[in-house]
Image (spheres, grey):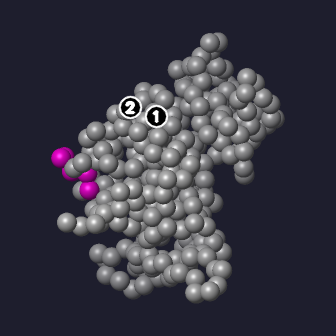
Amino acid sequence: MTDQPENPFPTTPLESNRAALAEMLSQTELYRTSQEYLDLLAFIARMGHFSPFNALLLRIQKPGLVWAASAYHWATRFERKVKPGSRPLLILWPFAPVALVYDLEDTEGPELPIAVAQIFRATGTVTEKRMKKWIGLLSGRGFSVDFRDWGPGRAGQVTRKLPDQGTEGKVSYNILINRDHDPNVQFASLAHELGHVFLGHLGKDNDRFITDAHFLPLPRRELEAESVSYLVCRRWGVDSRADTYLVDYTQPGTDVTRVDLDRITRAAGQVEAALNIGAKTVFRPVERKKKGIMLIGLEKE
């Protein structure tokens, strides 16, 4: 018999909130099979103008959601207005309780472009120049990235370095990437290794609000990290091999009900924030309060 902690995750208010979300996800039965899990990830990836976590919240509130935007965004970008009496959907927003958005079917106006999702996609092309820019950003945030001459079967790895004993330094990380891979593949590998960090697979990191999840079985850790890589890549417009890997990890019969989508979506958002490629959602460029709900301004450029 192996000794296991009764509750490996700290019971802080933040963790209590996450536990509540996990219970809500279980009750909504958003995914029970591997295909449903892949479909849910595809939805979160498609809603690239919202953070991964907010896209998850939208799916919970309305599983049949087609496309969502703020009333201001519908009006200014698509010349559509919200129908009277439409029920808004809620997303979380920094420095405000919530913000309101509306589904496509709750608006009226000109027809949308067929490829509406492409309007919000980034270029999807990763170049060596762009990779160098991201590596420079990461170097100032406690991540060093180096390249190695590896065979085609190895993509990357990440290690953790604790601060010297008696110092007040922060935990740092070293990421190794295959030098011979295409920049798009390197980007997917970078997102995967950063995913391991923010998912807690290398241990707890208080400075980055990361809880310890190193004890999870290896297949589950890889599924979670590859899910993060899939989300980051698809939301940036990069087609990576994560699609194939996820199919391998989620073959029929695979138990995906224990996968923590809360942690995955938050980790994907942290990866995007670390690379400065976060979601952008447009709201009315003024601040006002109505019935206790804050409607906030334009997205950060």
x%, y% of residue 154?
A: 33, 76
Q: Residue at x 18, y 47 (%)?
A: 253
Taking the image as shown, residue 200 lies to the left or right of residue 301, namely left
Please provide the residue range marked out in magenta: 249-253
In the picture, the disc for residue 290 is none
Q: Secondary structure at mark 1?
A: helix
Q: For mark 2, what is the residue?
A: 28
Quarter of the rendering containing residue 203: bottom left
Residue type pointed to by label 2: Thr
x%, y% of residue 115?
A: 50, 37
Q: Residue at x 33, y 43 (%)?
A: 37
| Magenta-colored segment: predominant secondary structure | loop
Mark 2 vs mark 1, foreground winner is: 2
x%, y% of residue 276?
A: 63, 60
Q: Residue at x 32, y 48 (%)?
A: 258
Q: CA distance from mark 2 to mark 1?
A: 10 Å
